Image (cartoon, helix red, strand yellow):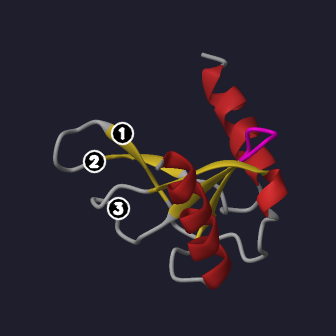
Amino acid sequence: AGGSLEGAEAVLQLGSHQGPVSVPCPTDGVPSTCCFSYHKQPIPRRLVSSVFETSSSCTQPGVIVVTKKKRQLCANPRVEWVQELLKDFQSLKN
């Protein structure tokens, strides 16, 4: 039953409530990643390995920014620097 402690340590490494939180999705019961607060400072593009939007079933919109060190941070999709990251990564996919 040591798994819960490891999970708590992982959450602590993400910082104070800025990381994503997995919650059960009400539609299909599969956990999905949701943001409950946002990382305030812009994250430099060179430190980011990927970005993706949270599920539409989340209570508030969010963008998960994955750093090259594998940290996942929640960002506000309405903020300009987040929109720029989304555009950058969208153009890489096409």
Distance between mark 1 and mark 2 Cα atoms = 5 Å
- Of the pair 89 and 8, the residue shown nearer to us: 89
**Res 58 quadrant in image:** bottom left
**Residue at left offset 73%, top offset 77%:** 40
Q: Main secondary structure of the magenta part?
A: loop
The numbered mark at residue 55 is none
Whether the residues at callouts 3 and 1 have beta carbons within 8 Å, the answer is no
Apparent side of residue 21 relative to residue 65 in the rendered image (left or right): left
Which residue reaches farthest front?
A: 94
Q: Amino acid at mark 1?
A: Pro
| Mark 1 burial class by Cα count in 10 Å: few <14, some 14-19, many 20+ | few
Image location (x, y in percent) of residue 83: 56, 75
Query: Can residue 17 be found in the magenta stretch?
Result: no
Query: Can residue 69 be found in the magenta stretch?
Result: yes
Image location (x, y in percent) of residue 7: 65, 33
Distance between mark 2 and mark 3 Cα atoms = 8 Å
Mark 2 and mark 3 lie on one chain; the one further toward the N terminus is: 2
Q: Which residues are magenta?
A: 67-71
The secondary structure type at the circle numbered 1 is strand
The numbered mark at residue 25 is 2
Q: Which residue is mark 1?
A: 31
Whether the residues at callouts 1 and 2 have beta carbons within 8 Å, the answer is yes
**Residue at left offset 36%, top offset 39%:** 31
Q: Which residue is mark 3?
A: 58
Above or below, comparing residue 82 to residue 90 in the picture: below
**Res 53 quadrant in image:** bottom left
